[in-house]
Each structure stands twice: as C-alpha cells, then as structure tokens.
C-alpha cells in the first residue's frame, strides 16, 4: 500500500474514532476518571493521526505541482514532512533515521505548511482554544508517562477545555481543507 492510500485508510479510521468517541461524552463516562483519561489520550491520538495524514496530503500536492513556484517546498520542509534525518555512516553510506517532534511545533508546522500549499489563511494561534489544546497536550504526557498520582486526575474543567481545543483543531483543519480540489 502506498503512502497516500495508507493516509486515506488512516483518515477513515480517524473519522470512525471520532464517531466512536461521541459515546464517551455521556455523563456516566465523564464522571469516571478512567474514561476521562482515555478520552484525553485518544483525542490527541486522533489529532496526531490527522497531522500525519495532512503531511501526506501536503507531500502529494507538492509532488503533483512541483513545477509551480507557489507549491515549492524547501529542502528543510520536505525533510520534516518525511519525518527523517539523514546521516552518513562511517562507510560513507546514507542512513535515514526517524525523527519525532513535540506536539506544538509539529501542529504549527503541519498547519502552516498545509495553509501554504493550499493557499489558505494561516491558523489563528492567538485563539484561547488553541492555548487550551496546547496546555492539555502537556496533560496528555502526564497521563501517558505517569510519575505523580495527583497528575492522574482529569478535572471536569479539563474535559471542557479538551472539547474546545478539539473544536479549534477541527475547525482550523476544515477551513484549510475546503481549499483542496481533487
């Protein structure tokens, strides 16, 4: 399966995941710490997956339009989109290594590049809901890599902020996506 086919399969799974997450917004689940943690982690998993799919769309668009100056990406942008860094071994052979970026720079890079290549307005990072999304990404790390018991409690307020942050992401992504022409 090629990268673009895989990206579309992942996209379909994301849509299903978001549909399945709806049931966790029932009060029975929202008052349970296990489900709150599950909801917080899974929403970021869906967002990270959307970012991967978006980077694949950007690469595809850049390859299809490589002769048009408006769509040219820099070497650095292409390297980041591929998530690779290349080194030379002691034998003088190139070796690619996976590289991982923290959430906020990855989100901004992906959305900014997505906006650039599809000629859309840049996202509004001054929005309070964007700030909530970033703040909760750090909470996701607390839950994924637990070190303190008190950081394992997800508050009702955090769940409200999570929903607002997800809304910001989906709205922002949709604004850019409306410029995609197949």
Image (spheres, grey):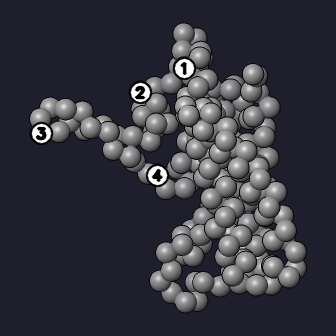
**Sequence order check: which comes first, mark 1 or mark 3?**
1
Q: Which residue is labeled 4 in the image?
A: 101
Instruction: Say if mark 2 contacts mark 3, CB within 8 Å.
Output: no
Instruction: Tell me the residue at 60%/32% (across/down).
Output: 4
Q: Secondary structure at mark 4?
A: loop
Q: Crowding at label 4, few (<14), some or many (≥20) Cα neighbours within 10 Å?
A: few
Q: Which residue is labeled 3 in the image?
A: 90
Instruction: Tell me the residue at 59%/17% (across/down).
Output: 64
Q: Position of residue 86 (x, y in %)?
A: 30, 37
CA gap between label 2 and label 3 equals 24 Å
Q: Which residue is labeled 2 in the image?
A: 75
Instruction: Say if mark 4 contacts mark 3, CB within 8 Å.
Output: no
**Sequence order check: which comes first, mark 2 or mark 3?**
2
Quadrant in the picture for residue 83: top left
Q: Secondary structure at mark 3?
A: loop
Q: Position of residue 15 (x, y in %)?
A: 76, 49
Disc number lying in front (1 or 2): 1
Residue 63 bears which disc, if any? 1
CA gap between label 4 and label 3 equals 26 Å
CA gap between label 1 and label 4 equals 23 Å
Q: Quadrant of the N terminus?
A: top right
Question: Is residue 123 rendered to the left or right of residue 77?
Answer: right
As drawn, 38 above or below 60:
below
As drawn, 175 above or below 100:
above
Quadrant in the picture for residue 45: bottom right
Question: Is residue 78 rendered to the left or right of residue 109?
Answer: left
Disc number lying in front (1 or 4): 1
**Sequence order check: which comes first, mark 1 or mark 2?**
1
């Amino acid at each position: 399966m090629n990268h673009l086919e895989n990206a579309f399969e992942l996209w379909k799974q994301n849509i299903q995941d978001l549909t399945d997450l709806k049931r966790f917004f029932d009060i029975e689940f929202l008052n349970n710490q296990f489900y709150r943690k599950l909801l917080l982690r899974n929403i970021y998993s869906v967002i990270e997956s959307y970012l991967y799919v978006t980077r694949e769309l950007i690469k595809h668009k850049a390859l299809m339009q490589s002769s048009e100056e408006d769509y040219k990406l820099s070497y650095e942008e292409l390297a980041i989109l591929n998530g690779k860094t290349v080194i030379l071994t002691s034998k003088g052979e190139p070796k690619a290594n996976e590289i991982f970026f923290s959430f906020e720079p990855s989100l901004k890079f992906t959305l900014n590049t997505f906006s650039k290549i599809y000629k859309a307005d840049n996202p509004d990072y001054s929005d309070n809901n964007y700030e909530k999304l970033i703040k909760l990404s750090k909470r996701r790390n607390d839950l994924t890599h637990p070190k303190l018991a008190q950081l394992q409690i997800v508050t009702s307020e955090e769940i409200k902020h999570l929903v607002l942050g997800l809304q910001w992401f989906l709205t922002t992504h949709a604004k850019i996506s409306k410029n995609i022409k197949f």
